[in-house]
Image: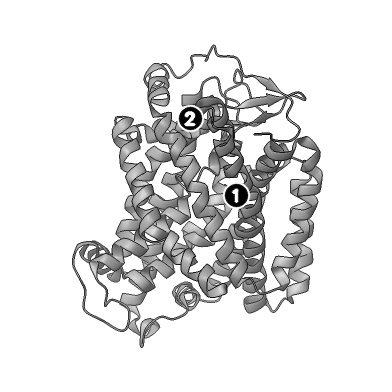
């Protein structure tokens, strides 16, 4: 059974999802008239409050919560895995998934915000599930998406992230797993039990700090590698289009491997097309769907176009400058990452250990909200508190047990979330593009369509 699960995970996140997601990225780019050209407008809007918008949290709060969930261990270990299996060229293809994925992030967010709903107590709820129900009259498909999201959150967004924290703290600071478990579960409970406003208050401060902290570490390593940075750039671009002979156990890869692993890890890292980030975007204060969608699409820009590229450059340049790091091959990609940051005297390894811990913890916060909203769509508001308590318990469990199979199952569930979400994006693209044309040059206009108030207890088909 375990062998089959591993096989199916590799199959799902191999050619099928690469084709589906890259195809959707290209489709959305063309369909929106290259919405990526508005990226810097989105960045400006993200720090411009929208007091007249309807919603629960600020646009910046929604963006940082989404970034909290997407900027995770995939930005560090995931990039190293792509390089180890696909060579330096994988960094280029990872970067390209980010560039084109910006358009998909725009479309899926626009879909979720446009079809969001308001609960009787005044909270916003939205995501692929409400869009599939209201926009396509396919509630059964929305239920499937919500069920996958509610379950997957315990794995990919909770237990595996907690395990990464306990591993990093244990290997670098000697902290027992049970101590890490207590710390993680207490800090998780303290934030998520306060609801989305509590989560966004933390992420608004945590995400900029942890991202800057990690980026500065990357820049220091790049400066220390000096002339190897230019060679690293050359290897990344050359490896993206031509096969490379083996050098020091790292660079012997085909173009097919570079494309496969670069795209797979990039798609997994930025979550464009998965439908997760739009769940919190639907809670943002925004006067029209386009405004928040432009803000949300910048999340893919920061996650993959900037942070993943910096990680890739840091690792490849370190391997070039210090070939002993990869002598005989790279079996444990975590080792390559710690060796690269270990170039910084004294504080290098603590920087990467703390970055891993912060990235993983922020992912827990973001995914707790995603899972909660999916569960509420399925079972009504009474499920919220039990779901949060369960999430806290699983965060402790994740710190103290081995999770290989749990990670794989959650990985599969995440991949399956893509299917109903992408169906919604393609089917509703005409309506979403019409909104884009209406509001993109009149970004302060108010959408006159009222947000429906609902009283859902248990999803019925």
SS state under label 1: helix
Q: Is residue 93 left or right of residue 76?
A: left
Q: Please give the count of numbered marks on the rendered protein.
A: 2
Q: Position of residue 195 (x, y in %)?
A: 74, 40
Q: Quadrant of the C terminus?
A: top right
What residue appears at the point 74 percent right and 77 percent down from the top-left corner?
176
> Which numbered disc, 1 or 2, marks the residue closer to the eye?
1
Report the disc number at residue 148: 1
Residue 13: x percent and y percent? Answer: 43, 60
Residue, disc 2? 110
- Residue located at (74% from left, 66% from top): 397
Q: Callout 2 environment at 10 Å: few (<14), some (14 to 19), or many (20+)?
A: many
Displayed quadrant of residue 250:
bottom left
* Closer-to-camera residue (208/246): 246
427, above or below 225, in the image: above
Q: Quadrant of the N terminus?
A: bottom right
* Mark 1 or 2, nearer chain start: 2
Badge 1: few (under 14), some or many (20 or more) residues near its Cα, within 10 Å?
A: many
Residue at figure coordinates x 31%, y 31% from the top left: 31
82 above or below 249?
A: above
Outermost residue on the left side: it is 242
Image position of 154 with respect to 422: above or below: below
Q: Is residue 355 visible?
A: no
In the displayed structure, 291 sits above or below 238; it is: above
């Amino acid at each position: 059974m375990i062998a089959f699960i591993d096989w199916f995970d590799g199959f799902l996140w191999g050619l099928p999802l690469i084709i589906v997601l890259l195809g959707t990225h290209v489709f959305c780019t063309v369909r929106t008239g290259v919405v990526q050209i508005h990226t810097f407008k989105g960045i400006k809007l993200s720090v411009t409050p929208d007091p007249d918008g309807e919603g629960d949290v600020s646009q910046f709060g929604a963006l940082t919560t989404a970034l909290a969930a997407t900027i995770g261990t995939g930005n560090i270990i995931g990039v190293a895995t792509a390089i180890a299996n696909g060579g330096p060229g994988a960094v280029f293809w990872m970067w390209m998934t980010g560039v084109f994925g910006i358009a998909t992030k725009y479309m899926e967010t626009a879909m979720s915000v446009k079809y969001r709903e308001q609960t009787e107590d005044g909270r916003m709820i939205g995501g692929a599930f409400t869009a599939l129900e209201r926009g396509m009259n396919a509630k059964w498909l929305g239920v499937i998406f919500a069920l996958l999201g509610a379950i997957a959150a315990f794995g990919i967004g909770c237990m595996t992230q907690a395990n990464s924290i306990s591993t990093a703290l244990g290997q670098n600071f000697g902290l027992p797993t049970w101590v890490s478990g207590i710390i993680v579960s207490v800090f998780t409970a303290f934030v998520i039990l306060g609801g989305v406003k509590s989560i966004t208050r933390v992420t608004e401060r945590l995400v900029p700090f942890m991202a800057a902290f990690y980026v500065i570490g990357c820049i220091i390593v790049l400066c220390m590698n000096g002339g190897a940075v230019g060679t690293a750039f050359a290897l990344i671009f050359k490896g993206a289009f031509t096969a490379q002979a083996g050098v020091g156990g790292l660079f012997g890869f085909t173009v097919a491997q570079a494309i496969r692993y670069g795209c797979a890890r990039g798609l997994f890292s930025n979550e464009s097309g998965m439908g997760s980030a739009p769940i919190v975007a639907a809670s943002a204060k925004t006067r029209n769907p386009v405004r928040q969608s432009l803000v949300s699409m910048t999340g893919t820009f920061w996650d993959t176009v900037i942070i993943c590229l910096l990680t890739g450059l840091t690792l490849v340049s370190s391997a070039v400058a210090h070939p002993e790091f990869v002598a005989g091959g790279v079996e444990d990609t975590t080792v390559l990452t710690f060796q690269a940051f270990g170039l910084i005297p004294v504080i290098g390894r603590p920087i990467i250990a703390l970055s891993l811990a912060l990235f993983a913890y922020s992912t827990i916060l973001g995914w707790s909200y995603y899972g909660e909203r999916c569960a509420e769509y399925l079972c009504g508001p009474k499920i919220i508190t039990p779901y949060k308590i369960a999430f806290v318990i699983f965060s402790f469990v994740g710190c103290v047990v081995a999770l290989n199979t749990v990670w794989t199952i959650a990985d599969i569930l995440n991949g399956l979330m893509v299917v109903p979400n992408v169906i919604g994006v393609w089917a509703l693209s005409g309506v979403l593009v019409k909104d884009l044309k209406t509001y993109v040059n009149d970004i302060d206009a108010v959408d006159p369509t009222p947000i429906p108030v609902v009283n859902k207890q248990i999803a019925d088909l």
